[in-house]
Amino acid sequence: MNDLIIRLKQLSSAEEFLQFFGVSYDEHVVHVNRLHILKRFYQYLHKAQGLADLNEVEMFTRYRELLAQAYQDFVHSSAAQEKVFKVFQDADGQQRVSLTSLRDGLAQRRSDSASPAKQAA
């Protein structure tokens, strides 16, 4: 395992990765999207061809490009638009609940909470 990979394993936050690779960033963008940026970076690394054939300097440069691309994805977009995580991929990040199911659920909760009170009386 080369030194770059060993050093990367010591990094944990998006800020640490961005600083390590010298990628300029807006703290607000990273604060709101840190997990999304790291997940997208991982996706880009996973799709990248020929990384294993690169020497350490070339690998650093390629990783830096992929991280910068992952960061830029969230500069002018949102996590919901980018759909990195499954919750955003399913139903466009929205769930629909019918009014009837809410009403029935509320009635059931009221019935359940009233039952112990009736039994105690």
Image (cartoon, rainbow, N blue to C red):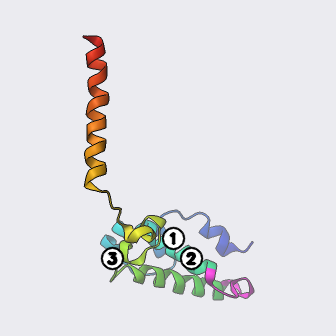
Q: Amino acid at mark 1?
A: Lys
Quick check: can you spot residue 15? Answer: no
Q: Quadrant of residue 93?
A: bottom left
Q: Quadrant of residue 8?
A: bottom right
Q: Up-down: is 86 above or below 26? A: above
**Residue 10 x/y as whole percent:** 59, 63
Q: Measuring 47% from the left and 80% from the top, which residue is drawn there? A: 70
Q: Point out the residue furthest to the top here.
A: 121
* Relative to 50, 68 lies left or right: left
The residue pinned by badge 3 equals 26
Q: Measuring 31% from the left and 36% from the top, which residue is drawn there? A: 108
Badge 2 or badge 3: first in the primary sequence: 3
In the picture, which quadrant includes the C terminus?
top left
Given residues 89 and 24, the one toward you in this image is: 89
Between disc 2 and disc 3, the foreground one is 2
In the image, which residues are magenta? 47-56
* Relative to 110, 10 lies left or right: right
Residues marked 2 and 1 touching at CB (< 8 Å) = yes
Q: Measuring 32% from the left and 83% from the top, which residue is drawn there? A: 76
Q: Measuring 46% from the left and 75% from the top, which residue is drawn there? A: 18
Residue 39's disc is: 1
**Residue 71 x/y as whole percent:** 43, 79
> Secondary structure under badge 2?
helix
> Secondary structure under badge 1?
helix
* Relative to 32, 48 lies left or right: right
Residue 43's disc is: 2
Q: Amino acid at mark 3?
A: Asp
Query: How many numbered circles does the render carry?
Result: 3
Given residues 43 and 113, the one toward you in this image is: 113
**Residue 58 x/y as whole percent:** 64, 89
